[in-house]
Image (tube, grey):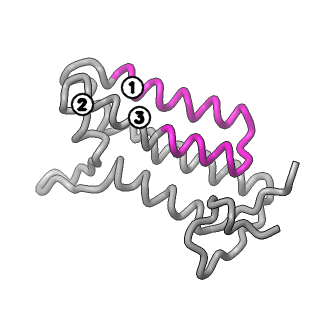
Amino acid sequence: MPDKKISQQDLDRLHRLARRMDNAFRIPLIGVRLGWDSILGLVPGVGDALALAPAGYIIKEAHRLGADNSVLGRMGANVAIDMLIGTIPLIGDLFDIGWKANTRNVALLRDHLDGKGAAYSSTEGRLSSHHPTLRSK
């Protein structure tokens, strides 16, 4: 199996996606932050399904970056909890504001990679670290 190069840019990209999904907006006066995941969840049925795409992408990227099965399982459980409780009207929407599965999953990935002593490489000038023709050999 080829050695996976992990770039700081990969983790930063996932962190930005999680922040948009979980913390993009601040509600004035009360200071609570919510993201597109919470907003999409307001649309019955379809909204929760649409919010699964970015969550699935984060898990797919975690796999590509070398996360162990135990970490991937915990990430999947976070998304499953978010999805199941999110289907309950009103309660699910309120839960979604506090659970922030995407942010939890990126933190799990970063902690796992740091624990493995992953060396982050710089990808200055590269379009995408996961594009097959841009990988260093």
What amino acid type is highlighted by mark number 1? Met
Q: CA distance from mark 2 to mark 1?
A: 10 Å
Q: Secondary structure at mark 2?
A: helix
Q: Nearer the viewer, residue 55 or 71?
A: 55
Indicate which disc residue 83 carries: 1
Which corner quadrant of the image does residue 70 belong to? Answer: top right
What amino acid type is highlighted by mark number 3? Leu
Q: Secondary structure at mark 1?
A: helix
**Residue displayed at 71% across by 53% down:** 113
Which corner quadrant of the image does residue 121 belong to? Answer: bottom right
Side of 130 relative to 103 (left or right): right
Magenta range? 56-85
Residue 27 image position (x, y, % from top left): 16, 52
Indicate which disc residue 67 carries: none
Indicate which disc residue 93 carries: 2
Side of 85 relative to 55 (left or right): left
Side of 106 relative to 88 (left or right): right
* Callout count: 3
Q: Is residue 26 above or below residue 66?
A: below
Q: Is residue 81 above or below residue 35?
A: above
Which badge, 3 or 2, is on the more N-terminal residue?
A: 3
Q: Residue furthest bottom?
A: 125
Q: What residue did someone put label 3 on?
A: 52
Q: Residues within 10 Å of mark 3 (few under 14, many from 20)?
A: some
Residues marked 3 and 1 touching at CB (< 8 Å): yes
Residue 66 image position (x, y, % from top left): 74, 47
**Residue displayed at 29% across by 48% down:** 35
Residue 34 image position (x, y, % from top left): 27, 47
Q: Residue furthest left?
A: 29
Q: CA distance from mark 3 to mark 1?
A: 8 Å
